[in-house]
C-alpha cells in the first residue's frame, strides 16, 4: 500500500497476452487474462473434455472451486493471471492461484531481452525479485489432469472468502489400478516467506506405496518436518498444525473416504448442510416476506426474513407509520447516485489535506520537520500546532489536541497537516514529515499494564452490588460449586464504515466558514471547529447530507478530520477537502473498548446461580471520550436477563497509549453479554461433565438459562443490581417463542446424535438473550410549508443509513392526516440535510432512539401547524358552504337555504376546533365539502400566516393536542436468538447453519427498515465474535489497518438460514408511536453463535479426553477454535 508508483502501463490490449487456447492436453492462458475468464475457461474445458463423475472431472472441479475462493468477484474480474503470479514472485504474496497452479503442474512462458523461455511455474516463482523485474510473463500452461490423477487443494483464511490464506496447499498423485501412488506432488503456500514450496519428502514417503497407517504417518511427519512455518511469524503454531491437517485431508480422499465431509471447506459444506440444495450464494436473493404461518423454512435459493408487515389494524390506525416502506434513498444508494461528503463538488481552486502522523507512542515531541514535505510536488503548506489561531483542543468534555504539541500519546497521532493541490500529493508528502522525539518510556498498551502503573481514569468506574445479606466473597465461599478467578478478554473492534472519515471546508465572507463532515454530531462539530479557529459559533455552518455508515465512529472521531479541514481552509483561504486513507482512519479512530475480566461464580448442582463476582477493565486509549458511558453501560448490562441473589461488578476505564476508544454499536453491551454468557457457558459445561454428559448439551444450556431468568411476576426481584426497575418484562414470552420457531428441543437431540457419530465435525446449538436499556434524547425539528403545499422537514438527527428520513416522513404524514383535509400523502414531504444553521445545538445521533425522537419532534411541529391552520381551514369550509348555498339558491330560484346548511356554516365560522369539525363531518359528511391541503395553504399565505414551525421533543408526547407526559422515554429492549453452528475440529472453521431471532420491537415504525437494522446488527456482532481480529505491534501501531488483515463478515458468513421475527401481541413498554429501538440490541444476539461454538468445541474436547469447559477470548478465530479442540 505504501509502494510509490510513478508510471502505470496497461498491458490489457496486447493480443498475445490475452490468448485462451485449449490444446490437445493443456490450456494456455495469456498473462493478461482475468482470473474470472480463467475460471470460465476451466469450466468450459471440464464440460467438454471430462466425463461426469470421472476422476478428471473431480480434479478439475477442485481447481475451479479453489479459484472461486480467490478474493472476490470484482478482483477476479479485474485482476489478471500474470499479475497475480508476478506479485507472488516479486513480493512474496500469499497467492492461492500460484499454489494451486504449481500443484496442478502448470508451466509459464516468459520473455526477456535474451529471448523466450518456458519453465515450471514453481521454478519461476523461486526467482529473485530482481530477476523477475527483467522479464515479462507471456502465458501460463495448465495441463489436463490424467485419467488416474487425483488433485485436491485446501485453504484456511481469516474468513471464508476474500481473505488471504494463512496456509494453502495443493496435492496431486496418480493412483494406479493396484492403489499404488506415483508422481506425487505436495505444494504448500504461505509457509515459506517468499513463494510456494514443493515438499519432496512427502512425495518420497508416498511414491511407490499403498496407503496404510504407517505410510500416512510417515507422509504427515515429512510434511511437518519440511514445510516449516517460521516460529516467529504470526499464528505459527496454528499454521504449522494446518500443514499436517491439509495432507491428512488429502490422504483421506486418496483412501477412498469420500464421505468425510470434514475434508471440505465450510464454503463447500454449506451446499450440503441440513439437507439444503446447492445454490449460488453470491446470487442469493434476500426476500422480505410476511410470515403467514408457523413454517419458518424458506425454499432453496432464498433467505426468508419474517414478519416485516404490520397487522392490518396497526397500519389502518397509524398509516403510513408501521408500513414496510423501503428507505427513500435506497435506489440512489444502490445505483451510486447518492452523494456523500467526499462526493460534494467544491470550487476549482480547492486544495487537499492529509495528516502526518507519529510512528511512535509515549514520546516527547521535540520538533516537526516539514522541509521535505514542503519541497514535494504540489505542496502548498505544512501546518503544525503553532499555526492554530484558537485552541489546540478538539475534545468536547475531554482534552484532545488536534495536532500534538508536546507529547505524542499514541502511534498514529497527527503531528502536522500537509496541504497540496491533489489528494495524492498531500498524502505522499505527509509521509515525508519527520517528527523529532525524545523517549519518555515504554508505551502502556494493555489494561494490565495500565493497572500496574495506576493509570486508571479517575472517576471512570462503576460498582454495583446485590446482596442477600452476606458479602460476595462469603456467598462464593458458601456455594456448593464454584469457578474462581477465571480470566477472559475481548479485543477492540473497528467501526469499519464504508465511507472513511472525511470533511471539506470552504471559507466564506465575513470570517465565516462552511464545513461538510461525515458525522453523527453536528453541534459538537460546530463547537470544536469554532474553538480551533478562534471564531464564534454563529460563523460556522456545518452540514451533512448523509454518512456512509457510522456505528458510533462518527460521534466524536470525525472531529480531527472536520477541524483539520477547517483549519487548513482558514489558513490558506481556499476550500480544502480531507479524506482519510483507510489505514490512517483505522489508526486514528480507535474503535470499541477492549476488556479484561476476572470472574468468579458460585452455583449448585441444579445449575442455579448463587453468586457472581466480576472485575472488568475497559481500555479507553489515552483520553476519556465516551469511556464513561461505555463503562456504565457494561456495568449495568452485565446481568443480562439473569437474577443472581449475590452479585458484584466493578468496571473501570483504563488509560493507555492507544488511540482514543469510543462508542461503537452496542457500546459496553456486547462486552457485557460476552462476559455473562461466558459465565453461563462455563457453568453449563461444568455440570454437563459432572453429570456424565447425560443431558444433551444444548438442552442443558437452554434449561439453565431459562431457570436463572428474572422471575416474571416478582416485582421485588425485577430490579437490576444498579437499581433500575425492569418493567414490561417480555423475556419469558420471547424464550418460548424463539424455542418454538427454532424447533429447539428436537434439534438439540439431533445435534447430540450428530456429535456422537462425527469425530471431525461437531455441532452446537445455543439460545441467548438480550436486555438492552435505551432512552430517547432531546431532538429538534423545523417544518416549512411552501406555496405549492409541499413541506420541507429538518431535524437534528444525522442520516447514517438507518432510514431516519423515511421514518420521519412517515410520522409527519401520519400527523398531518389528523387534520381534516384531503391531499395529504408522503409525496408532500422531503427531509433536508443536517444543517446547524437550521437546527442549532442538535444532539448526537446514537443510542438507537434518534429516529423515534426525531419522529416525535416532527409530529409536535405538525401538531402546532394544525393548531395554527385550523381557523384557516374553518374559513375555507365557511367559504365553500357559502358558495354552495349561493349556487343552490341560484339553481332553485329562491332565497332560502336549508337549515342544515346554515347551521353547518355557523359551526365552521365559529372555528370550533379540529376535533369538533371532524366530528361534525363524521355525522353528515355530505354537509361539509372536502377541503384540500393546498386550499388551506393558499388561504393562509393570502392572509400572511407564517407557515414555518420549530418544535422539540423532550419527553413522551401524547396526542397531538395534549400536554406532554412528564416521564422520559426510557425502556428495556428484549430479544432471544437460537443459533446452530458446525465446526471443523481440525481447521477451526465455522459454518453457521441457522439462526432464529425473535425480538420485541414494539410496533415497528417501519418493519422493512427495522428488520434490516436487526440483521445488520447481528452480523456486526458476528464480526466481534468471529473474524475481526485487531492486531497491534509493540508500539501500539495497528497492523491490521486495512482489508488485508482486518476481516468484517461477508455474505457467506451470514447464517445459511436466517429467520428474524418481531414479536407481536405484547402491549408492554412501548416508546414513541408504540415502537421500540432496533439498531443496536440485536447486535448482542450474536452471542448465540459464540455460545454454540463453545458447545461444539466442548463436544470435541470430550472426544479428545479433555475437560469440556474451555474459556475463550473474543474474537474466537479459526486458530483459537482449532487449538482448543486438541489442547
Image: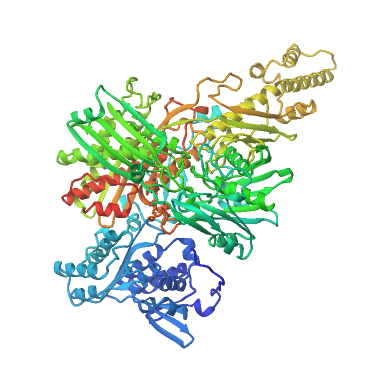
Q: Is residue 970 left or right of residue 815?
A: left
- Give the number of callouts: 0
Nearer to the camera, 551 or 985: 551
Q: Is residue 336 visible?
A: no
Q: Is residue 924 above or below residue 441?
A: above
Quarter assignment of residue 961: top right
Q: Is residue 300 above or below residue 75?
A: above
Q: Is residue 273 visible?
A: yes
Q: Is residue 157 above or below residue 831?
A: below
Nearer to the camera, 1107 or 581: 581
Residue at image location 32% in from the left, 49% down from the top: 1116
Nearer to the camera, 392 or 89: 392
Q: Is residue 876 left or right of residue 247?
A: right
The x and y percentages for residue 296 are 38, 41
Q: Is residue 616 left or right of residue 916?
A: left
Quarter assignment of residue 512: top right
Amino acid at each position: 500500500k505504501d509502494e510509490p508508483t510513478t508510471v502505470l502501463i496497461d498491458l490489457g490490449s496486447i493480443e498475445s497476452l490475452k490468448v485462451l487456447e485449449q490444446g490437445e492436453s493443456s490450456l494456455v492462458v495469456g498473462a493478461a487474462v482475468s482470473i474470472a475468464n480463467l475460471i470460465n475457461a476451466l469450466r468450459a474445458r471440464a464440460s467438454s473434455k471430462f466425463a461426469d463423475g470421472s476422476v478428471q472431472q473431480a480434479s478439475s472441479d477442485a481447481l475451479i472451486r479453489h479459484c472461486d475462493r480467490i478474493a472476490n468477484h470484482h478482483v477476479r474480474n479485474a485482476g489478471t493471471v500474470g499479475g497475480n503470479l508476478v506479485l507472488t514472485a516479486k513480493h512474496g504474496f500469499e497467492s492461492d492461484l500460484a499454489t494451486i497452479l504449481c500443484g496442478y503442474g502448470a508451466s509459464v512462458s516468459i520473455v526477456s531481452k535474451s529471448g523466450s523461455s518456458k519453465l515450471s511455474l514453481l521454478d519461476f516463482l523461486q526467482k529473485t525479485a530482481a530477476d523477475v523485474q527483467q522479464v515479462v510473463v507471456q502465458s501460463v500452461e495448465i495441463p489436463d489432469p490424467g485419467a488416474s490423477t487425483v488433485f485436491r487443494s485446501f485453504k484456511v483464511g481469516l474468513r471464508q472468502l476474500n481473505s488471504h490464506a494463512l496456509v494453502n496447499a495443493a496435492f496431486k498423485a496418480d493412483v494406479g489400478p493396484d492403489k499404488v501412488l506415483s508422481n506425487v506432488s505436495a505444494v504448500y503456500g504461505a509457509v515459506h516467506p517468499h513463494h510456494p514450496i514443493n515438499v519432496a519428502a512427502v512425495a518420497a514417503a508416498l511414491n511407490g506405496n499403498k496407503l496404510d497407517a504407517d505410510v500416512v504417518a510417515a507422509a504427515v511427519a515429512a510434511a511437518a518436518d519440511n514445510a516449516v512455518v517460521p516460529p516467529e511469524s504470526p499464528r505459527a503454531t496454528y499454521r504449522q498444525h494446518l500443514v499436517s491437517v491439509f495432507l491428512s485431508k488429502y490422504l483421506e480422499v486418496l483412501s477412498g473416504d469420500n464421505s468425510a465431509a470434514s475434508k471440505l471447506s465450510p464454503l463447500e459444506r454449506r451446499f450440503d448442510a441440513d439437507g439444503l440444495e446447492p445454490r449460488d450464494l453470491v446470487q442469493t436473493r434476500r426476500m422480505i416476506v410476511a410470515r403467514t404461518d408457523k413454517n419458518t423454512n424458506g425454499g432453496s435459493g432464498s433467505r426468508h426474513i419474517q414478519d416485516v408487515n404490520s397487522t392490518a389494524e396497526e397500519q389502518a390506525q397509524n398509516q403510513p407509520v408501521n408500513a414496510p416502506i423501503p428507505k427513500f434513498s435506497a435506489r440512489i444508494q444502490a445505483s451510486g447516485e447518492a452523494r456523500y461528503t467526499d462526493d460534494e463538488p467544491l470550487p476549482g481552486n480547492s486544495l487537499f489535506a492529509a495528516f502526518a502522523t507519529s510512528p511512535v507512542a509515549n514520546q516527547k515531541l521535540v520538533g516537526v520537520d516539514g522541509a521535505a514535505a514542503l519541497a514535494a510536488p504540489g505542496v502548498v503548506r505544512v501546518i503544525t500546532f503553532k499555526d492554530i489561531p484558537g485552541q489546540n483542543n478538539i475534545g468536547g468534555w475531554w482534552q484532545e489536541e488536534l495536532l500534538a504539541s508536546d507529547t505524542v500519546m499514541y502511534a498514529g497521532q497527527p503531528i502536522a497537516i500537509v496541504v497540496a493541490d491533489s489528494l495524492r500529493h498531500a498524502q505522499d508528502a505527509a509521509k515525508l514529515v519527520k517528527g523529532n522525539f525524545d523517549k519518555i518510556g515504554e508505551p502502556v498498551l494493555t489494561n494490565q499494564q495500565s493497572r500496574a502503573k495506576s493509570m486508571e481514569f479517575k472517576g471512570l468506574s462503576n460498582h454495583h452490588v446485590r446482596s442477600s445479606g452476606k458479602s460476595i466473597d462469603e456467598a462464593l465461599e458458601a456455594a456448593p460449586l464454584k469457578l474462581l478467578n477465571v480470566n477472559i478478554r475481548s479485543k477492540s473492534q473497528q467501526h469499519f464504515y464504508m465511507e472513511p472519515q472525511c470533511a471539506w471546508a470552504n471559507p466564506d465572507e465575513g470570517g465565516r466558514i462552511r464545513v461538510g463532515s461525515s458525522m453523527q454530531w453536528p453541534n459538537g462539530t460546530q463547537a470544536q471547529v469554532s474553538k480551533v479557529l478562534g471564531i464564534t459559533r454563529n460563523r460556522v455552518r456545518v452540514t451533512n447530507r448523509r454518512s456512509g455508515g457510522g456505528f458510533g465512529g462518527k460521534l466524536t472521531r470525525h472531529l480531527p478530520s472536520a477541524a483539520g479541514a477547517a483549519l487548513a481552509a482558514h489558513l490558506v483561504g481556499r476550500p480544502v477537502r480531507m479524506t482519510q486513507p483507510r489505514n490512517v482512519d483505522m489508526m486514528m479512530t480507535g474503535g470499541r473498548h477492549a476488556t479484561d475480566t476476572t470472574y468468579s461464580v458460585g452455583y449448585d448442582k441444579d445449575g442455579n446461580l448463587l453468586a457472581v463476582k466480576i472485575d472488568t477493565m475497559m481500555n479507553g486509549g489515552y483520553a476519556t471520550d465516551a469511556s464513561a458511558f461505555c463503562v456504565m453501560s457494561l456495568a449495568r448490562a452485565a446481568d443480562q436477563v439473569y437474577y443472581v441473589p449475590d452479585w458484584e461488578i466493578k468496571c473501570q476505564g483504563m488509560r493507555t497509549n492507544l488511540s482514543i476508544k469510543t462508542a461503537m454499536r452496542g457500546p459496553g453491551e456486547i462486552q457485557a453479554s460476552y462476559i455473562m454468557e461466558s459465565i453461563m457457558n462455563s457453568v453449563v459445561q461444568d455440570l454437563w461433565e459432572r453429570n456424565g454428559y447425560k443431558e444433551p448439551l444444548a438442552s442443558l444450556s437452554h434449561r439453565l438459562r431459562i431457570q436463572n431468568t428474572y422471575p416474571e411476576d416478582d416485582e421485588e426481584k425485577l430490579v437490576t443490581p444498579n437499581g433500575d426497575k425492569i418493567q414490561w418484562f417480555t423475556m419469558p414470552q420471547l424464550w418460548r417463542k424463539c424455542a418454538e420457531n427454532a424447533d429447539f428441543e428436537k434439534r438439540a437431540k439431533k445435534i447430540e446424535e450428530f456429535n456422537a457419530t462425527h469425530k471431525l465435525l461437531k455441532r452446537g446449538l445455543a439460545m441467548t438473550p438480550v436486555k438492552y436499556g435505551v432512552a430517547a434524547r432531546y431532538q429538534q425539528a423545523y417544518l416549512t410549508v411552501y406555496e405549492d403545499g409541499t413541506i420541507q422537514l429538518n431535524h437534528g438527527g444525522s442520516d447514517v443509513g438507518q432510514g431516519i428520513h423515511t421514518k420521519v416522513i412517515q410520522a409527519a404524514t401520519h400527523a398531518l392526516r389528523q387534520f381534516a383535509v384531503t391531499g395529504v400523502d408522503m409525496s408532500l414531504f422531503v427531509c433536508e440535510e443536517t444543517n446547524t444553521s437550521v437546527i442549532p445545538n442538535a444532539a448526537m445521533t446514537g443510542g438507537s432512539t434518534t429516529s423515534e425522537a426525531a419522529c416525535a419532534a416532527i409530529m409536535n411541529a405538525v401538531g402546532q401547524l394544525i393548531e395554527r391552520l385550523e381557523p384557516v381551514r374553518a374559513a375555507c369550509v365557511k367559504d365553500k358552504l357559502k358558495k354552495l348555498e349561493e349556487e343552490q339558491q341560484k339553481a332553485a330560484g329562491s332565497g332560502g337555504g336549508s337549515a342544515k346548511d346554515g347551521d353547518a356554516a355557523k359551526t365552521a365560522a365559529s372555528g370550533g376546533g379540529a376535533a369538533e369539525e371532524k366530528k361534525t363531518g363524521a355525522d353528515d359528511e355530505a354537509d361539509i365539502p372536502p377541503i384540500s391541503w393546498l386550499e388551506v395553504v393558499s388561504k393562509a399565505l393570502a392572509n400572511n400566516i407564517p407557515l414555518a414551525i420549530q418544535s422539540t421533543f423532550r419527553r413522551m408526547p401524547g396526542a397531538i393536542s395534549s400536554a406532554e407526559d412528564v416521564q422520559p422515554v426510557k425502556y428495556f429492549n428484549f430479544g432471544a436468538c437460537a443459533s446452530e453452528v458446525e465446526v471443523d475440529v481440525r481447521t477451526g472453521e465455522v459454518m453457521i447453519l441457522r439462526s432464529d431471532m425473535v425480538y420485541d420491537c414494539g410496533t415497528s415504525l417501519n418493519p422493512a427498515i427495522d428488520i434490516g437494522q436487526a440483521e445488520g446488527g447481528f452480523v456486526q456482532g458476528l464480526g466481534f465474535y468471529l473474524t475481526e481480529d485487531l492486531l497491534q505491534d509493540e508500539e501500539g501501531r495497528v497492523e491490521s489497518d486495512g482489508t488485508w488483515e482486518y476481516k468484517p463478515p461477508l455474505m457467506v458468513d451470514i447464517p445459511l438460514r436466517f429467520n428474524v421475527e418481531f414479536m407481536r401481541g405484547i402491549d408492554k413498554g412501548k416508546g414513541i408511536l408504540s415502537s421500540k429501538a432496533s439498531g443496536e440490541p440485536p447486535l448482542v444476539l450474536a452471542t448465540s453463535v459464540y455460545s454454540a461454538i463453545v458447545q461444539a468445541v466442548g463436544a470435541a474436547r470430550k472426544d479428545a479426553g479433555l475437560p469440556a469447559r474451555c474459556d475463550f477470548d473474543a474474537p474466537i478465530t479459526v486458530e483459537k477454535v482449532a487449538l482448543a479442540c486438541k489442547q
